[in-house]
């Protein structure tokens, strides 16, 4: 799965950002590489799983049906109802798609053979953050009206007028640029760093195994570390999917609330 | 950590960045226009003050 070859022969080559670049699958098109393939695959996986588990819904659910319903229930109750409040139901489909999509694409990072978290390519989190961005501004504009919304962002009540010259640009920049940026960068950085960490210990173990007798003795520790970190990564991957969806819900809740 | 705190934590990071980027950027622009070297520091300080003031307004007053 890696682009590297013969790493052991010419000394240890630490993993780098180049391990995140893949060869094109069809011809020379750089648009369709492994991450793009994984995104399509994830959509198929999610659709098949939820259609299969909900089509023949039983009153006493099977295991798969229970899992599917738990995930849906979690998004609806914990992320939707608790955060957004009474109007939550129309946002549940969006939140649910977001959550499952990010979750599956993150978990790809630790599935054998696939072993690549799609979200460690920054383009994907940016696209998702743009969706969130579009939704929460649209909700706010619909709820408050365009001019009142802009006024609410630009002018905080209860401060002397000259201070607005300093504060308003900062507010605007936060709402329009920094917030969606932190949203996508957090997801990207977590997945990128996690994948790199796994690569370090796996490739390190492999390199040690190819070395002299002392290195061979040490290599199991590296592999054990890699296995331990894989479980750790699983936690991080679920958490990041949750946080991304939660923050989306929070922004929507903020857009719906009257006091900004 | 409650949901509200989680939101506040990330918004605060966002505010700090925006303040420094905007006013630091203006200071840096003025520096290269006027051939000076200290305005970028002034800009960063103004931006940080603005961010902290905004954070206090939004989250510190309750």
Image: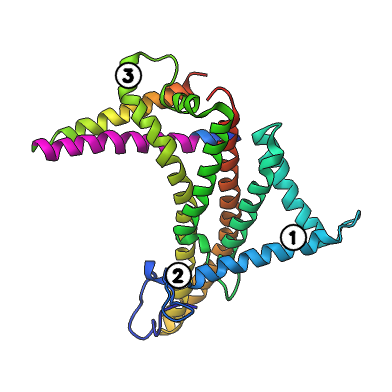
Q: Are marks 3 and 1 in contact (CB under 8 Å)?
A: no
Instruction: Provide the chain ID for the residue under circle 1.
Output: A
Picture quadrant of residue B45: top left
- Residue A136 in the image, given as x and y percentages of width and height: 55, 39
- Give the spatial CA distance, label 1 vs label 2: 28 Å
Name the residue at 59% across, 29% down.
A143
Mark number, residue A183: none
The residue indicated by pointer 3 is A163
Give the magenta range. B9-34
State yes or no: residue A203 in magenta.
Answer: no
Which colouring convention does the figure follow?
rainbow
Where the N terminus of chain B falls, by quadrant? top right
Q: Nearer the viewer, mark 2 or mark 3?
A: 2
Name the residue at 72% across, 66% down.
A48
Classify mark 3: helix, strand or loop: helix
The residue indicated by pointer 2 is A31
């Amino acid at each position: 799965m890696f682009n590297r070859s013969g790493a052991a022969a010419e000394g240890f080559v630490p993993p780098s950002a180049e391990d995140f670049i893949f060869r094109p699958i069809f011809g020379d098109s750089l648009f369709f590489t492994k991450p793009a393939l994984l995104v399509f695959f994830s959509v198929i996986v999610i659709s098949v799983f939820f259609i299969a588990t909900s089509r023949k819904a039983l009153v006493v659910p099977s295991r798969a049906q229970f899992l599917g319903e738990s995930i849906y229930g979690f998004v609806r109750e914990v992320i939707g109802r608790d955060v957004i409040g009474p109007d939550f139901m129309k946002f549940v489909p969006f939140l649910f798609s977001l959550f499952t999509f990010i979750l599956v694409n993150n978990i790809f990072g630790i599935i054998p053979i696939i072993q690549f978290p799609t979200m460690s390519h920054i383009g994907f989190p940016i696209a998702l953050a743009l969706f969130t961005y579009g939704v929460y501004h649209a909700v706010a504009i619909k709820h408050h009206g365009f001019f009142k919304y802009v006024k609410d962002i630009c002018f905080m009540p209860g401060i002397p007028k000259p201070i607005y010259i300093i504060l308003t640009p900062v507010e605007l920049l936060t709402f329009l640029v920094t917030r969606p940026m932190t949203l996508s960068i957090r997801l990207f950085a977590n997945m990128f760093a996690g994948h790199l960490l796994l690569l370090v210990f796996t490739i390190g173990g492999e390199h040690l195994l190819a070395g002299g007798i002392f290195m061979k003795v040490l290599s199991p520790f590296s592999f054990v570390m890699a296995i331990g970190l894989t479980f750790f990564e699983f936690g991080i991957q679920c958490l990041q999917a949750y946080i991304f969806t939660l923050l989306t819900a929070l922004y929507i809740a903020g857009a719906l609330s009257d006091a900004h | 950590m409650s949901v509200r705190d989680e939101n506040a934590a990330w918004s605060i990071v966002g505010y700090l960045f925006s303040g420094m980027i905007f006013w630091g950027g203006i200071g840096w622009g003025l520096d290269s226009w006027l051939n000076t070297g200290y305005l970028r520091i002034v800009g960063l300080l103004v931006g940080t003050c603005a961010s902290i003031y905004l954070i206090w307004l939004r989250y510190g007053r309750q």
